[in-house]
Amino acid sequence: MERIINKIRDIPDFPKPGIIFKDITPLVKDPQALRFAIQELMQPFTARPITAIAGMEARGFIFGSLIAWELNLPFVPLRKPGKLPYDVQSVSYDLEYGSAALEAHIDALDTTDRVLLVDDLLATGGTAKASCELVEKLGASVEACAFVVELDFLNGRNKLSGYEVHSLVHF
């Protein structure tokens, strides 16, 4: 995974002092590294009964849509409020510095769907947990959650107890 780690840039004091932001822009800029990351991210799930891929706004769209393309599965965008034009289901959740929400079209998934949730980073786990709740609110089940990066020291995995979690690199 050194190949992926070498393509993740640290940005100190972003978005606020004391935080070191893990920037995946160099990874997505390099086609060979990106292809490697996508292959490694989806590899544990290629023989599983997954019927859809869901990605969290915004960087989850990059990795999730590429995995959906590779596996020939539908991609479901989990969006910030007010971005989807049709009837939506919504889940609100708390952040360290406020609150947020995610939405998906009410017909994006159904009770027969088994979903792989994909995002670039697992930090505190709030967005990932809300994403699981949204998928389940739509009637589907969460097969697993996959992340390029996991910040182990923030213990986000704890919020996802009961869900399988696959992360490529750990900091």
Image (tube, helix red, strand yellow):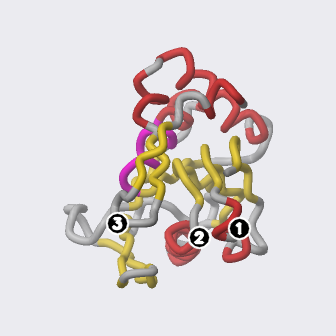
Secondary structure under the numbered disc 1 in the rendered image: helix
Along the polypeptide, which appears first: circle 3 or circle 2? Answer: 3
Which residue is found at the position 43% from the left and 59% from the top? Answer: 108
Which residue is found at the position 24% from the left and 62% from the top? Answer: 84
Residue 63 magenta: yes
In 3D space, how far apart are the residues under numbered discs 1 and 3 (Cα atoms)?
23 Å
Secondary structure under the numbered disc 2 in the rendered image: loop
Amino acid under disc 2: Gly
Q: Which residue is mark 3?
A: 16
Crowd rating for badge 2 (residues with CA inside 10 Å; few <14, some 14–19, many 20+): many
Crowd rating for badge 1 (residues with CA inside 10 Å; few <14, some 14–19, many 20+): many
Name the mark on residue 125: 2
Q: Which residues are magenta?
A: 57-65
Which residue is found at the position 41% from the left and 45% from the top? Answer: 61
Classify residue 37 as left or right of residue 158: left
| Residue 158 against residue 121 in the figure, above or below | below
Amino acid under disc 1: Arg
In the depicted view, which residue is nearer to us: 27 or 90?
27
Quadrant of the image for the N terminus? top right
Along the polypeptide, which appears first: circle 1 or circle 3? Answer: 3
Q: Are marks 3 and 2 in contact (CB under 8 Å)?
A: no
Q: Which residue is mark 1?
A: 157
Q: Position of residue 5 (x, y in %)?
A: 62, 34
